[in-house]
Image (cartoon, rainbow, N blue to C red):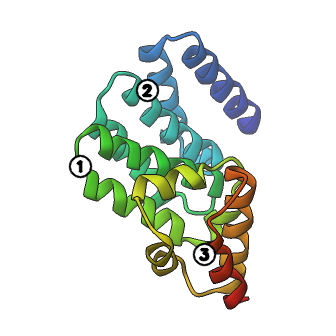
Amino acid sequence: ASQKLRELTVGKAKTLLAMGKLDEAKKVFEQVASVREWRGESTAFSVYSLGEIAAKRERWPEANAYFQRVYVGYQKFLPWVAKAYIRSGESFEKMGKTQEAANTYRELLRNEKLQIQPGLPYEELVERLCLDEDQLAQVLDSRVSFRRVFVFQLLDVAGAVDEKLQDLGRARY
């Protein structure tokens, strides 16, 4: 019964958000996040959604606090963690805190578990960091599997990777 109620409540919150009823959606997402028995992915999603609501209102410090709460407190839920890192970096950018944004993107790129999340804009993150090949190699972790996954995702997303980066990738495999 509790699981069904959770699903219905999350569905209601999603619907309210989609309809642009931000105040009502916020209340319902807060409810989901506060119920101890519902702890888990629905909580991570709800906290992320609270960040999205704050971002829609251009309340960047508040939005960023929610996004950071997701990637610090809900590390098991990788899709939400990865999205929260990106939105946190974007929030820092909106606040004019470019160094904090860059640090957030670097942290995301360094996290091996997050590299397999589909749909992440890896090429865009590398561009935002303004990294050349040597700097990118320094950001990347030394683990072979991480590099392999990252290079393949860059190839898929960008369509092409600088020849020097490909040489670097081949040399380290």
Measured as percent of width and height from the top left, residue 79 is found at 65, 52
**Residue at x 31% of width, y 43% of height:** 93
Task: In the rendered view, tell whether residue 83 sits above or below residue 142.
Answer: above
Task: In the rendered view, tell whether residue 62 sits above or below residue 165.
Answer: above
Q: Quadrant of the C terminus?
A: bottom right
Numbered disc in front, either 1 or 3: 3
Using the image as rendered, state which of residue 68 and residue 46 is in the foreground.
Answer: 68
Q: Is residue 98 left or right of residue 14?
A: left
**Residue at x 64% of width, y 48% of height:** 41
Q: Residues within 10 Å of mark 1 (few under 14, many from 20)?
A: few
Q: How many marks?
A: 3
Q: Quadrant of the N terminus?
A: top right
- The residue wearing badge 1 is 97
- The residue wearing badge 2 is 53
The tag on residue 150 is none
Dot 1 or dot 3, earlier in sequence: 1
- The residue wearing badge 3 is 164
Task: In the rendered view, tell whether residue 54 sits above or below residue 131.
Answer: above
Q: Marks 2 and 3, Cα distance to the nearest angstrom?
A: 42 Å
Measured as percent of width and height from the top left, residue 24 is found at 47, 15
**Residue at x 63% of width, y 51% of height:** 40
Q: Marks 1 and 3, Cα distance to the nearest angstrom?
A: 31 Å
Q: Is residue 74 left or right of residue 135?
A: right
Q: Marks 2 and 1, Cα distance to the nearest angstrom?
A: 21 Å
Measured as percent of width and height from the top left, residue 102 is found at 35, 59
Using the image as rendered, state which of residue 84 and residue 129 is in the foreground.
Answer: 129
